Amino acid sequence: MTVLRLHPDVEERLRRHLQPALEVIADTTLVFLREKLNQAGSGIHHPGLPNPSSNPGEYPAKQGGALLACLGKEQGAGGWVVGALNSVAPVPPEAWALEFPIPPNSPISRATGYGARPWLSKVASDTELVQRIRVALAALQ
């Protein structure tokens, strides 16, 4: 029987080699989010708003800038956290309301026919972001 013996500090070695890749993924994701949330939408330009609104399926259009202002990244126990962070700036209630159509206990209801504008779950499966991450990781090698 063959026994696989791992080096005693295998966890530390993995962490040392993976941390640069995880940070590149976090940086790339943050830049991508800032780009996508700093645009006008292609929908209706409602009176009183600076930009046209987004259409269903699009990232939310920039209107007041509060969501954009709270975007950041932090190193956590096992990796990085990217998104709307109170440690960067107060996270507006719209951050939740845009993601979910009917947020419980939220002062903002998105239960209209227009629906939500999920931004965080959308970025998790965005093929454009995946491609950018691949390019960024390839540059590490």
Image (cartoon, grey):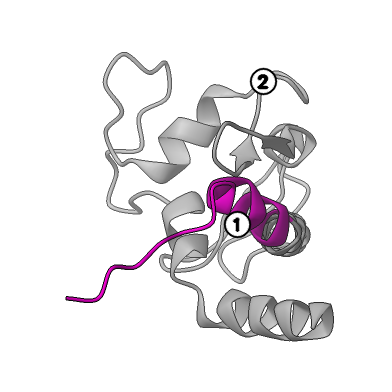
User: Which residue is pictured at 29% across the width and 43% down the height?
Assistant: 112
- Separation (CA) of disc 2 from disc 1: 30 Å
Q: Amino acid at mark 1?
A: Leu
- Which residue is painted at 74% across and 64% down in the image? 28
The one nearer the camera, 112 or 119, is 119
The residue located at (33%, 40%) in the rendering is: 100
Q: Quadrant of residue 103?
A: top left
Q: Position of residue 51 (x, y in %)?
A: 74, 55
Q: Is residue 39 visible?
A: no
For the magenta stretch, what is the residue range? 1-19
Residue 8 belongs to the span the image colors magenta = yes
Amino acid type, mark 2:
Asn
Residue matched to label 2: 86
The image position of residue 127, as x and y in percent, is 51, 82
Quarter of the image containing the C terminus? bottom right
Does residue 48 sit above or below 129 in this rendering? Answer: above
Q: Is residue 14 magenta?
A: yes
Q: Which mark is residue 14?
A: 1
